[in-house]
Amino acid sequence: MRKRLLSWLAICCLLTLPFSAPPPVAAEEQPSLSHVFEMAAAEFEVPVEVLLAIGYAETRWMDHQGQPSQLNGYGIMHLAENPTNDSLVQASRLLGIDKQVLTRDIQANIRGAAAVLRQIAKEQNQGHVPKKLADWYTVVAEYSGLSSHQTKAWYADDVYALINRGVSRVINGQEVRLKPTLVTPNHGEYGEPRDPSGQATPDYPEARWVAASSANYTAANRESDGNAINYVIIHTTQGSYNGTISWFQNPSAQVSAHYVIRSSDGQVTQMVQNKDIAWHAGNWDYNVHSVGIEHEGYVNDPAWYTDAMYRASAKLTRWLCDRYGIPKDRSHIIGHNQVPGATHTDPGPNWDWNYYMSLVNQSGGGADLVTDNATSNRFTASANWAIGTTNAQKYGADYRYANPETISDAAWYKVNLPTSGSYDVYAWWPSGSIYNDRTPYVINTTNGSQTVHVSQRTSGGVWNHLGTFNFAAGDANRIAVSRWTTGTGYVIADAVKFVKR
């Protein structure tokens, strides 16, 4: 009885006790969500940054009240039970807690994830737990439970990107904050990027290609076979971006969509060729005559529907409509919930159809301002920056590259901004293992110079969101790629993009 009266924190310090559920806490004594993360981190010797970043990447720190994701994952930490991920089962075994409790109890869910992470860490490190934050990368990749080497690496990349830039959100009136911590992860077995694309290429020029399992769609030859593409159908994934990609790669899923779009920066991945029939609408006739676009997030949480996502999706939809002659109206650009016989509610009440359609029809939002390294009178670099053409992920005909040096020899992009205000800033680079893992982008804002570090070993051939910044109107050098870095490998300067908020 005495042990049951001890606080959870005291129990965590008694190393002789097995993992078990903490004693009940009175409602008025419930710890804050931040404190729950801190206690679980201390109990299981997992960096709190890792726990917070995984929770944010999976669910934006929302528990969804016991409702599963598309991958049958539960709670803030997405403890799952599916053909490739049994973290829910593992957590139940490690803590001695029933799975139903883990799906609904926030504290138990976070403790369960911490226990699983600790177990993976010990299995990977001869019974020890890594002492450095950088060495948890492979643990995070394995925790994802995703089906391929590449999607596991992308998952871990996203988690460490959150750790590096930090994030905060108010949950139930209390702020939860992941403070930015600069760390270069130890990629271990995930250090060498693997190309998942095979020989196929995306239809949409701004997408990357990752093939869905052939068991999850019907091969066809639209529109040459007489099946016109008449609709674009908008979906919400009810799960994470990388998790959805991995699920569509799994032959047991029996579901797919043509495109998946990431919340944070609008990255587009195509998984089924437009000519083929993706299984997304729950209605065969609509499947045959439509293209499906999945958007990362959950229908009950508007935080997932970012401006970057809206803009990227609207640009894709506009391109599809122009290519296939689809009218740009709400009779032909529809939600999954509008498909006859639909049992799904996505994209849900938080999807802003008016804003989205204004972007599709180009009557709202600012134009994309793209500056390539080859843009006349817009790019300046010394002779130390060589011209490269061999990497197929380049933007345009070529790119510039240079060795890192502790000298002032940046490559500058000049951008003419029509109005003052807030802009989303993106960068494009080709990726490879010989490129720099800590490339500095120096951004001249109205609040002074700000530097964002990125790894150019991954995420090549797409627009990568560097952040949102305030700028004054006019023509000026806005952003530079610096050679002054502690990273190793060639520094790449290819293209940048500004999008008005």
Image: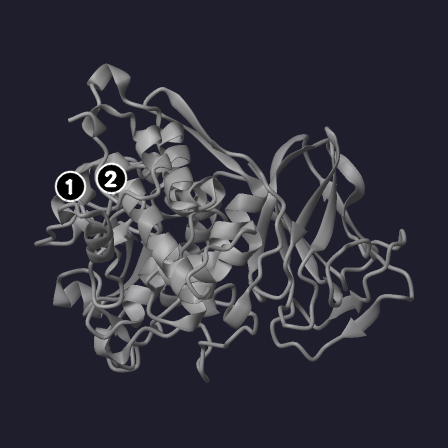
**Residue 85 pos. (x, y %):** 26, 62
Q: Mark 2 and 1 residues: CB-CB less than 8 Å, in contact?
A: yes
Q: Quadrant of residue 152?
A: bottom left
Residue 108: mark: 2
Q: Secondary structure at mark 2?
A: helix
Is residue 189 found left or right of 357 in the rendered image? right
Q: Amino acid at mark 1?
A: Val
Answer above or below: position of 480 versus 397.
above
Cα gap from disc 2 to disc 1, whole angstroms: 7 Å
In this picture the colour scheme is one colour
Label ID, residue 101: 1
Circle nearer the N terminus (2, 1): 1
Give me the residue at 51% from left, 72% from top: 189
Q: Quadrant of the C terminus?
A: top right
Q: Quadrant of the N terminus?
A: top left
Is residue 442 left or right of 191 when viewed as pictured?
Answer: right
Q: Where is 34 relative to 452, above or below?
A: above
Q: Nearer the viewer, residue 474 or 265?
A: 265
Q: Nearer the viewer, residue 49 or 230?
A: 49
Can residue 361 be seen at all in this image of the molecule?
no
Query: Considering the numbered disc 1 on the image, is that residue within a helix, a strand or a loop?
Result: helix
